[in-house]
Amino acid sequence: MRILGISAYYHDSAAALVVDGRVVAAAQEERFSRRKHDARFPAHAVRFCLDHARVAPDDIDAVVFYEKPFLKFERLLETYLAFAPRGYRSFAMAMPLWIREKLFQKDLLGRELTRLGFTRPAGRLLFTEHHQSHAASAFYPSPFLEAVVLTMDGVGEWTTASVSIGRGKTLEPVREIQFPHSLGLLYSAFTYYTGFKVNSGEYKVMGLAPYGTPRFTKEILDSLIDVKPDGSFRLNLDYFDYATGLRMTNDRFARLFGRPARTPDELLEPFHMDIAASVQAVTDEVMLRLSRALADEFRIPNLCLAGGVALNCVANGKVLRDGQFQRIWIQPAAGDAGGAVGAALAAYHGHHGGDRVSACTPDGMSGGYLGPEYAQDDIERRLQSVGARFDVAADDRAMIAATADALASGQAVGWFQGRMEFGPRALGARSILGDARSSSMQKTLNLKVKYRESFRPFAPAVLREDVASWFDLDDDSPYMLLVADVKEQHRRAMTESEQRLFGIDKLNVVRSTIPAVTHVDYSARVQTVHRETNAPFYDLLQAFKARTGCPVLVNTSFNVRGEPIVCTPEDAFRCFMGTDLDLLVVGRALLRKDQQDSARRQDYARSFAAD
């Protein structure tokens, strides 16, 4: 049984292929098109999935779309009617698109599939509800046979949060919260208010929060959101404009906090840090109340999470440490991209009655490594075609030794190995790596490699067996979706010179023996590395530990600000040449910056500056 799942037409479109209940391939369209958050039909991703599994289009038994367009249109119409005459301008802008395209989405999907070689695609098209896709993506790939499943995001068709109970191959919805009341939209409203882009800048708010003090928490709880003891909530729509307007917040929202929304080019001030800290504190509280109530009601030890809110690793970490659930599993592609996986799994189990597959290692997402990979001879041919100069290590052991030596000497390394990750996080397949012990690495990577805001933290990749020795965590965290504090014995005060280096000398900050991955509140977004899912990355960490005594590396996504994570060896070379990376490792090919053509380096640098 071969089922293709598709997520498209909002943001982060993706495709996933499930064969006999097992996810065998999945990828976001942006990685191929090089258009960040690409929302178009995922033609490239579909082709990849079919090619990887060596499946012809007409060998696919069903194609499943991750939401139901007619229900979404119903919500749109009913919302405009409920708020009329407000929102006419937004209504007038939305209706032509809906009437021209979205009302006929089945036909649109059919035409796109026909272009890819599907014959009679309409007869194989199925549609799941948005939060059904999220719930399926959370439960079925999890290692649990029974679990409470909580999904939360901005909005699907009507639902903004749902609770389901998964047992075996069944997934039964229990309750939901509906639009316009949404924790995801509340967080997005603050993303907009602090000057970041909605649907992509929420993680910047989360990263900014530890710099601030949550002094506006009372105003949020008193005026914006009414949170009940069980975690259910309602928003006060008098302060928001997202239901029918063209903005997330309105003037009343701005008056509540005493100033207008920040524009993207304005400097970040302590005020914005305090705003970010406050909405994060409210999000943490809602998640804790919800998880405590669900644990008490259902008495099931396992919790699964999906939806965009599940990417808030700070709140996830607090739910785990709260201890109400013994084990937590979070879908690594928790946002809309993961809906492609969930749609296919929901159809396999719900529509076709398929059984759960046997236990996977460590779960049904194969560590997230579900994208394209390249053979060594193909890597070398591709690099030669773009003028790269490189040496080839004799074997994997020599490649890992050379990389570990470079990292131990303070070099920034582009690391390209095996199958590309599915989801927003780089997990050691398409990563930029650095020495976590370096006090300058965080600033170097942010400003000279990633070209992004200097306040943004980096994540530690740590050997699974060593995680409890370095962080207040002794659980698997393979997908970088849990935040934990650095252990007390690894903390130290930041020197005055380091404070100046980081540009935050006015703040009372502290660091650790691994300052490049320690946030100002001693927290870190931890990735545990497991030999079973990524042997080369595991072996690299082992080699680095043997040289330095430290089993922790900086791990950030292999891209620059505004670009998707690299997909091909050519993408990796372009990013390497346009940034201050010192070494690029693609398979066993080793590319050193000082060996590359200087004129070509200048061309790539200018290209990135123009972008």
Image (spheres, rainbow, N blue to C red):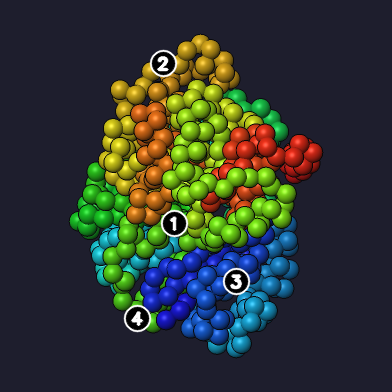
Front label number (1 vs 2): 1
Compare marks 4 and 1 and give the one earlier in the sequence: 4
Front label number (4 vs 1): 1
Q: Is mark 4 on a helix, strand or loop?
A: loop
Q: Nearer the viewer, residue 404 or 552?
A: 404
C-alpha span from label 3 to label 2: 52 Å
Give residue 562's quadrant in the image: top right
- What label sits on residue 493 in the rendered view? 2
C-alpha span from label 3 to label 1: 19 Å
Q: Name the residue under label 4.
A: 353
Q: Mark 3 points at which residue?
A: 47
Is the residue 284 above or below the residue 151 in the image?
above
Q: Which of 558 and 295 is in front in this view?
A: 558
Looking at the image, residue 528 sits to the left or right of residue 259; the answer is left
Compare marks 3 and 1 and give the one earlier in the sequence: 3
Compare marks 1 and 2 and give the one earlier in the sequence: 1
Image spot of residue 191 (x, y percent): 57, 41
C-alpha span from label 1 to label 2: 36 Å
Q: In which quarter of the image is the C terminus?
A: top right
> Which residue is depicted at the point 62% across and 28% down?
268
For disc 2, the neighbor class at 10 Å (few under 14, some 14 to 19, many from 20) is: few
Compare marks 4 and 2 and give the one earlier in the sequence: 4
Give residue 141's quadrant in the image: bottom left
Q: What residue type is labelled 4?
A: Gly
Image spot of residue 199 (x, y percent): 58, 50
Compare marks 4 and 3 and give the one earlier in the sequence: 3
Q: Which amino acid does label 1 sit on?
A: Gly
Looking at the image, residue 311 sits to the left or right of residue 449; the answer is left
Compare marks 3 and 2 and give the one earlier in the sequence: 3
C-alpha span from label 4 to label 2: 57 Å
Q: Mark 1 touching mark 2, by CB under 8 A?
A: no
